[in-house]
């Protein structure tokens, strides 16, 4: 069935009388058509943000003020991590008692001490052992060492005895030393000291039982006493002589 065109009908969709016009027809956007927030709602949001910022600021200041105290306390006490638990209430506050002083050892008397003769009276022989020994000798009119009796009587008086010299008294005489003269060597740079061992390689065999000549060669140079001058060069031939042969029983 075909639609009939009437001159009074407008072009486009048919709109009812109670239908509101669209925002597009009114030249308005859908976002702009929404209602704005009220002033009370905006004030509440700002107040909540201010309260949150204040709480954060207070917590930050308290934490920053409390951390130095904790660090100082840990530095003083050294912390408690890794330490065993100690009950301070049950620990004793009394100081430890000092150890008792040890008794001093008894003083030892100088001299000869025999524990078996402590309660006994010393005999004259024991007193004689403790007495000093002195010896004097007079020969040739001068004072010198001579033996004296080493025994003393009961009252301290020397006992009667012979004054003859003994072997011990004779050894008390001083030894007599003869004077020794020393002189400087005239030319030490051109002198070989007596007793110097000079190595020498034999060229002829030695038979100490037969007289004859012996020849050897120096394997190294021979220097003087000071070591500055070479007196015998290396390769120098040295000649010696055995004048008399050794006989049986004779020392070399």
Image (cartoon, rainbow, N blue to C red):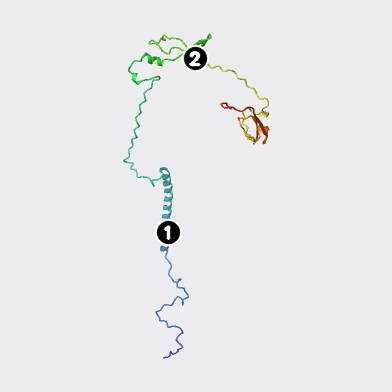
Which of these two is toward me, 83 or 53?
83
Q: Is residue 180 above or below residue 10?
A: above
Residue 218, given in percent of the width and then of the height, sits at: 65, 35
Which of these two is toward me, 248 or 29?
248
Which of these two is toward me, 57 or 248?
248
Residue 124, given in percent of the width and then of the height, sits at: 37, 13
Would residue 224 be seen by someone viewing this image from the given angle?
Answer: no
Residue 133, given in percent of the width and then of the height, sits at: 44, 15
Residue placed under numbered mark 2 in the picture: 170
> Looking at the image, which residue sits at the far left?
90
Q: Residues within 10 Å of mark 1 (few under 14, many from 20)?
A: few
> Horizontal placement of 29 versus 83: left or right?
right
Quadrant (top left/top right/bottom left/bottom right) for the N terminus: bottom left
Residue 205, given in percent of the width and then of the height, sits at: 62, 34
* Residue shown at the point (38%, 14%) measured from the top left: 125
Residue 49: give its label. 1
* Residue shown at the point (42%, 55%) measured from the top left: 56
Q: Is residue 182 above or below residue 73?
A: above
């Amino acid at each position: 069935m075909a639609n009939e065109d009437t001159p009074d009908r407008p072009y486009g969709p048919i709109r009812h009388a109670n239908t509101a016009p669209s925002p597009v027809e009114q030249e308005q956007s859908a976002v702009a058509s929404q209602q704005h927030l009220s002033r009370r709602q905006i004030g509440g949001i700002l107040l909540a943000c201010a309260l949150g910022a204040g709480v954060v600021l207070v917590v930050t200041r308290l934490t920053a003020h409390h951390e130095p105290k904790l660090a100082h306390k840990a530095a003083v006490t050294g912390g408690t991590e890794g330490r065993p638990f100690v009950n301070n209430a049950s620990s004793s506050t009394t100081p430890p008692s000092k150890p008792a002083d040890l008794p001093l050892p008894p003083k030892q008397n100088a001299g000869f001490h025999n524990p078996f003769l402590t309660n006994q009276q010393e005999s004259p022989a024991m007193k004689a052992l403790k007495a000093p020994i002195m010896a004097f000798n007079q020969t040739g009119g001068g004072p010198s060492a001579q033996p004296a009796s080493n025994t003393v009587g009961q009252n301290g008086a020397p006992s009667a005895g012979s004054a003859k010299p003994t072997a011990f008294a004779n050894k008390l005489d001083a030894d007599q030393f003869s004077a020794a003269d020393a002189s400087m060597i005239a030319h030490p740079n051109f002198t070989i000291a007596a007793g110097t061992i000079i190595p020498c390689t034999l060229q002829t065999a030695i038979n100490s039982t037969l007289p004859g000549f012996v020849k050897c060669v120096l394997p190294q140079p021979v220097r003087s006493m000071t070591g500055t001058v070479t007196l015998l060069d290396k390769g120098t031939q040295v000649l010696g002589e055995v004048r008399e042969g050794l006989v049986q029983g004779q020392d070399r």
